[in-house]
Image (cartoon, grey):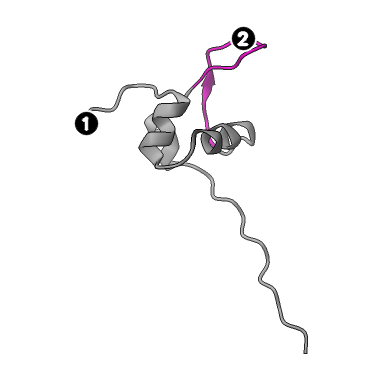
Amino acid sequence: MTVPTLLTEEEAAEYAGVNRKTIRKLILTARLEASNYGTMRRQHYRIHPDALAKIKPIPSPLPLIPRQ
């Protein structure tokens, strides 16, 4: 499979093995770099495949310590 220069949200989701909504959330929370080719009313994001490798992980919550 050849990888195109820029991926749509759907293509990026398939490439990363996640849901399209996950890709959109990562973009909106600035954890995934993307270019907006849409309008103010409807955003159309394009993602470079290298950006998928640089996804910033979600910080894990503190471990729960059982009460004694």
Numbered circle sitting on residue 9: none
For this orientation, the residue located farthest to the bottom is 68
Q: Is residue 11 visible?
A: yes
Residue corresponding to mark 1: 1
- The secondary structure that most of the magenta stretch takes on is loop
The number of numbered badges drawn on the structure is 2
Quadrant housing residue 61: bottom right
Give the percent coordinates (x, y) of residue 26: 57, 37
Give the percent coordinates (x, y) of residue 4: 31, 22
Dot 2, crowdedness within 10 Å: few (<14), some or many (≥20)?
A: few
Task: Pick the residue in front: 17 or 51.
Answer: 17
What residue sits 40% from the left and 24% below the top? 7
For this orientation, the residue located farthest to the left is 1
Residue 28 painted magenta = no
Q: Earlier in the sequence, mark 1 or mark 2?
A: 1
Image quadrant containing the N terminus: top left
Judged from the image, the secondary structure of the residue bearing numbered disc 1 is loop
49 lies left or right of 65: left
For this orientation, the residue located farthest to the right is 68
**Amino acid type for the residue under numbered disc 2:** Thr
Judged from the image, the secondary structure of the residue bearing numbered disc 2 is loop
What residue sits 59% from the left and 51% below the top? 58
The magenta stretch is: 32-45
Numbered circle sitting on residue 39: 2
Give the percent coordinates (x, y) of residue 9: 47, 27
Q: Is residue 59 above or below residue 23?
A: below
Quadrant housing residue 38: top right
Q: Is residue 47 visible?
A: no
Q: Is residue 23 above or below residue 45?
A: below
**Amino acid type for the residue under numbered disc 1:** Met
